[in-house]
Amino acid sequence: MPKLTIDGREVDVEAGLTILQACQKIGIEIPHFCYHERLSIAGNCRMCLVEMERAPKPVASCAMPVAEGMVIRTNTPKVQQMRRGVMEFLLINHPLDCPICDQGGECDLQDQAIGYGYDRSRYAENKRAVKDKYMGPLVKTIMTRCIHCTRCIRFITEVAGVPELGATGRGEDMEVGTYVEKALTSELSGNIIDLCPVGALTSAPYAFTARSWELRPTESVDVLDAVGSNIRVDTRGPEVMRVLPRVHEDVNEEWVSDKTRFAYDGLKRRRLDRPWVRRDGKLQPATWADAFAVVAQRLKDAGGKRVAAIAGDLADCESMLALKELMTRLRSPNLDCRQDGAKLDPTLRASYLFNTTIAGIERADACLLIGTDPRREAPVLNARLRKRACMGKFPIGVVGPAGDLTYDVQHLGEDPAVIQEIAAGTHPFAEILKQAKNPMLIVGQGALARADGAAILGLARRIAETCGMIGGEAGWNGFNVLHTAAARVGGLDLGFVPRKNGLDLEGILEGAGRGDIDVVYLLGADEIDMRRLGNAFVVYQGHHGDAGAARADVILPGAAYTEKNGTYVNTEGRVQNGRLAVYPPGEAREDWKILRALSDVLGKPLPYNTLGELRARLTKANPVFARVDAMQPAAWGEFGGDGPIERAPFVLPIDNFYLTDPISRASLTMARCSEIFITGELGKTGTDA
């Protein structure tokens, strides 16, 4: 380890670090704009200049590796003068937009100008002006503010893998843009807003709506996919104003998808804020007492086996446990949380988890994707796959529809027979997996939601066992299921699946169509084919007027994920807590409280009155809920089926990334993105900006 002296202190640091990183490790702050720990080094802002003994001129600390015997000075009068000079040059052409800039109050340039800048300007010439660039409906540009740090360019190229940003011109004529005017096509494009150290790139939907000091932050987790990205929900009064990422190295690092970041406007549109009861063929407003009375009477008349329950993709674990226990008291064995009909095995936890873990992807050295498109199903996880691919020596095979995943892959075909060949060891890619030290596979819902999903799950298990994915160093487990629903793993952990002689999703839909099921209770379930419910009496408990509410006979208004304290389990089995940021609108209530109140009306009260008591019950139902934000390896065993495989090609579960759930479907921002990127109705020019 090199030994160097920084401001009179002798320190030992790891080889390969830069001077700036070494200073950060011992608590010395070095101002910088272009440097970012997750991006390549550019060294072009010069704000991090320091003095180095025997160096003929100042050195950029972000780009200079440490070496034995270095003597560094970071806060001498000469260094302070250099910083004032660099800041003065940066501000030469920067407009005085602070009073109207959305970055005001959380701007690196503001902070560093106060801390390190000069108190006056000597520049009297005209300022340079730069035309704003069009980057799509999500990112607003004011390019005259740009200081050419190139963070946005490096992120889009290196992390997002969509090299659509770059710099043209030199010196004072340099401009950052998209070369040809077009919208950024990355599902992670919003992260460049956080990376921009000035106000050149800001959030278009958030523009001119609030100031940072007016907002109340709440730490929570995202539920719009199964990754469980850590987020911060900023609110003002009763309204969610924006959603930002929180750092969690093992889950989302510091990135979130555009849907996570921008779909929040859907939280205030098409909301259910009062109970409704269908009378004379029309939904009419009702009181809670009236709605409960109607539901209770129909449940009592139907009897146990003629009642069924389906949990939706955004349901929290507390509400699923409450509904499961209510169905138990009603003697109904018919319940399912697999809204897409995926043939997942609930009896063995390892069979439905992302066992490698998201952070564990970086340890893998070969990968097989089966019936999944992680770029659209889980963009943040896909960025981790790209990160590993960029390290080199990471062959990736894809069985399923071909697409641009932002990294090089070997497309092995769309025929499920390829999986059989790999499992039998006759396919060339099987040898690649066997030679790898830590191989992994990812099977998606596009493979498991088919009629032969159980057989495909069994084949995936055989591949994991025969290609060395189980065991290995440090208990390596390379078998992974990538879910698309935030509620799926939690529901399976709770056993929200058919009990003995009970009906699964397909059985419930068939039974309702035949008239064998009289009452169907939908807990936020909107992704099923409502036409197959026949004449069944439908109770919909949810927060948006989506497909389930349109079909319902009684609507019980629930709370969205930002309006309740809820527990969610992500695709890797990590238990995380979402927190209440604002209260539900109108007469809507938290979901578990609705079910607790309904159980009283039915005369079958559930045994908890507080969230603490319910969470204790949650832990009793499955001990995994006792360890929040901790990974617990699952035991390996036999799972999956051995039936015949259909020759129909795989179909991906998501055809429109921007409209996958009731919240995003209610969002005008996501509708705009869908028009531009999916349907192409508005094209990709600045005319729709």
Image (tube, grey):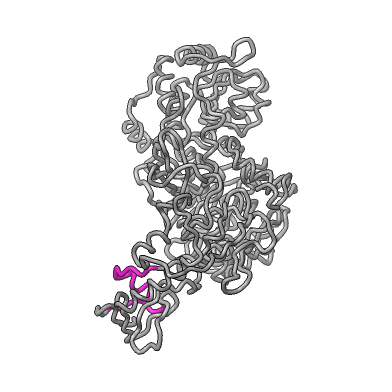
Residue sitting at x 55%, y 28%: 502
Q: In the image, is residue 619 above or below residue 544?
A: below
Magenta-colored span: 11-31
Q: Position of residue 58 (x, y in %)?
A: 40, 82
Q: Position of residue 316 (x, y in %)?
A: 45, 36
Q: Nearer the viewer, residue 72 or 413?
A: 72
Q: Quadrant of residue 55?
A: bottom left
Q: Position of residue 535 (x, y in %)?
A: 65, 18
Residue furthest top as drawn = 280
Residue furthest front as drawn = 124
Camera sees residue 357 = no
Q: Nearer the viewer, residue 419 or 103?
A: 103
Q: Is residue 199 magenta?
A: no
Q: Nearer the viewer, residue 150 or 645?
A: 150
Q: Quadrant of residue 135?
A: bottom right
Residue sitting at x 49%, y 73%: 44
Residue sitting at x 41%, y 31%: 583
Left or right, residue 648 beside residue 497: right
Q: Nearer the viewer, residue 532 or 99?
A: 99
Q: Position of residue 427 (x, y in %)?
A: 69, 64
Q: In the image, is residue 364 above or below residue 223?
A: below
Q: In the image, is residue 76 above or below residue 259?
A: below
Residue sitting at x 62%, y 46%: 657
Q: Quadrant of the N terminus?
A: bottom left
Q: In the image, is residue 595 above or below residue 223?
A: above
